[in-house]
Amino acid sequence: MTPWELKGRELVNCTCEYGCNCQFNALPDKGHCHAVAGIQIDQGRYGETRLDGLAIAAIFKWPGAIHEGNGEAIAFVDEAADEMQRGALLKIMTGQDTAPFATMFAVYASTVTRMNPPVFTKIDLELDIDGRKGRIFVKDYIETVGEPIRNKVSGAPSRAQIVLPEGFEYAVAEIGSASSKTTGPVQVEMKDSYGQFARLHLNNNGVVRA
């Protein structure tokens, strides 16, 4: 197993309401799960291959709960990545060189039955984790915008967090609101639904905890 580790930031938008039942071992509140994710890698390595500064993204579409499988996905890798970096990122994203079910990459990959060919392209990410603001833009594929949840009366930003001491993706996530529309082979559309803003620190064995 090639050792790897990455530190970064993510924005995830899915079809669930702001709490996202999946975070609580419950079934998706719409009966299905569609999701868009973007990750900015601030520091990373796969063996001797550096991954600093690269971005990845993905679109997922499950007809039911994630664990029931039959999902479809497409992965996007930063066009700035060289051949070695592209190979490394795709291995991480598809759960290879990872302990069984140790990361969200490995869990989701195990539930996908149709993986579309990866796309190597420019990925524009704007990620303000504490401010719960962000954007994922992949030309011809993804347009996602995230913002804080707003008080229904005053319009003021409302802050909420999800803490998962034994989670496989993050330790703490800031929760906001997000909307997405995608084109291409995996088409999803969400409006003012669950937006997850998190700092990531992962390796072969899952979340790296202090």
Image (cartoon, helix red, strand yellow):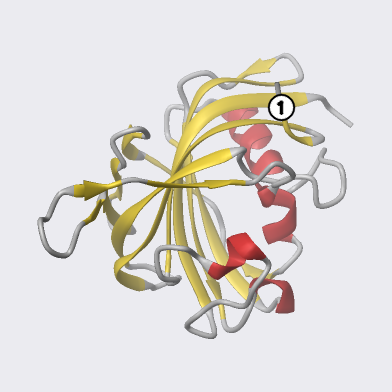
Secondary structure, mark 1, is loop
Picture residue at 52% right of the left edge, 60% below the top: 74
Q: Position of residue 205 (x, y in %)?
A: 82, 35
Which of the 4 quarters of the picture holds residue 80? top left
Q: Position of residue 13 (x, y in %)?
A: 41, 58
* Mark 1: few/some/many CA within 10 Å (<14, 14-19, 20+): few
Residue 94 seen from this side: no
Q: Is residue 46 above or below residue 27?
A: above
- In the rendered structure, the answer to whether residue 107 lies left or right of residue 43 reads right
Picture residue at 69% right of the left edge, 40% below the top: 92
- In the rendered structure, the answer to whether residue 145 lies left or right of residue 73 reads left
Residue 144 seen from this side: yes
203 or 138: nearer the viewer: 203
What residue would you read off at disc 1?
Answer: 209
Which of the 4 quarters of the picture holds residue 108? bottom right
134 or 186: nearer the viewer: 134
The C terminus sits in image quarter:
top right
Q: Is residue 97 above or below residue 64?
A: above
Q: Is residue 200 above or below residue 103?
A: above
Q: Position of residue 202 (x, y in %)?
A: 68, 32
94 or 37: nearer the viewer: 37
Q: Disc 1 residue type?
A: Arg
Q: How many marks?
A: 1
Picture residue at 79% right of the left edge, 45% below the top: 102
174 or 185: nearer the viewer: 174
Q: Position of residue 55 (x, y in %)?
A: 45, 34
The N terminus sits in image quarter:
top right
Picture residue at 37% right of the left edge, 68% below the top: 184
- In the rendered structure, the answer to whether residue 146 lies left or right of residue 156 reads right
The residue furthest front is 153
